[in-house]
Amino acid sequence: MPHDAEAFLDRLDRHATASAALAEWCATRFPGCAGPLAAAVIEDRELSPAEPAPLPRDPSAPMRYRRVRLDWGGTMVSQAENWYLPRRLPAGIAARLLDSTIPFGVLLAPFAPLRRAIRTEILDRSDVALEVQAVMALPGRGDVALVRELYSRALLPE
């Protein structure tokens, strides 16, 4: 594994959200670019009951699918897919996700989220260097989301 990939994954492991790790990494990696991390929402919709879900579902509670591109100062640094349970989120957070460019992790940060990486893969693609899957949980609320993150090769200098 390349040294920069190891360093980035170590940073991810030391933060409660990927957003916090990414913002810290980008501030160091791209010192001339202004933050903050911004999410451009590509898709956000309710999953139909027929679609496969990566988290256990309550038949009476919806699950949403959100796909975003995360930018730092005009540079695309990550793409993320997020399957989340709106009813398990703190009051107002689900609504903010629908009308905001604030990343999911930034919105959850004040609520002491717990992030568990379940899969990490170094990719040999021209545009993407890493793929990480993680489960996000909140104290007293259980698992609230599964995220699949694709990190841009631009994050890891050659």
Image: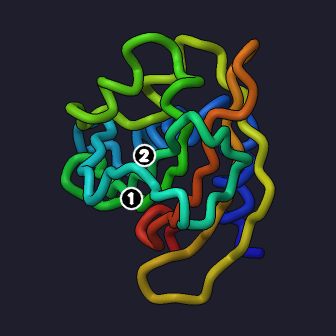
Circle 1 residue? 77
Residue sitting at x 40%, y 51%: 66
Tell me the element at label 1: strand
First along the sequence among labels 1 and 2: 2
Q: Nearer the viewer, residue 18 or 23?
A: 18
Q: Which residue sits furthest front?
A: 60
Residue sitting at x 60%, y 70%: 130
Vertical arrangement, residue 144 with respect to residue 12, above or below: above
Q: Which of marks 1 and 2 is in front?
A: 1
Percent coordinates x, y for residue 77 in the rendering? 39, 59
Percent coordinates x, y for residue 127 in the rendering? 42, 81
**Among the 4 quarters of the image, the one containing residue 16:** top right
Percent coordinates x, y for residue 105 in the rendering? 50, 33
Residue 11 appears in the figure: no
Residue sitting at x 62%, y 68%: 131
**Among the 4 quarters of the image, the one containing residue 32:** top left
Vertical arrangement, residue 70 with respect to residue 95, above or below: below
Q: Which amino acid does label 2 sit on?
A: Cys
Vertical arrangement, residue 88 with respect to residue 57, above or below: above
From the viewer's perspective, is 30 left or right of 57?
Answer: left
* Mark 1 crowdedness (10 Å alpha carbons): few <14, some 14-19, many ≥20: many
Count of numbered badges drawn on the protein:
2
From the viewer's perspective, is 71 left or right of 148?
Answer: left
Would you say the residues marked 1 and 2 are in contact, meaning their CB atoms lie under 8 Å apart?
Answer: yes
What is the CA distance from the residue labelled 1 to the residue labelled 2? Answer: 8 Å
Residue 19 appears in the figure: yes
Circle 2 residue? 26
Percent coordinates x, y for residue 134 in the rendering? 70, 50
From the viewer's perspective, is 85 left or right of 37?
Answer: right
* Mark 2 crowdedness (10 Å alpha carbons): few <14, some 14-19, many ≥20: many
Q: Which amino acid does label 1 sit on?
A: Val
From the viewer's perspective, is 25 left or right of 113?
Answer: left
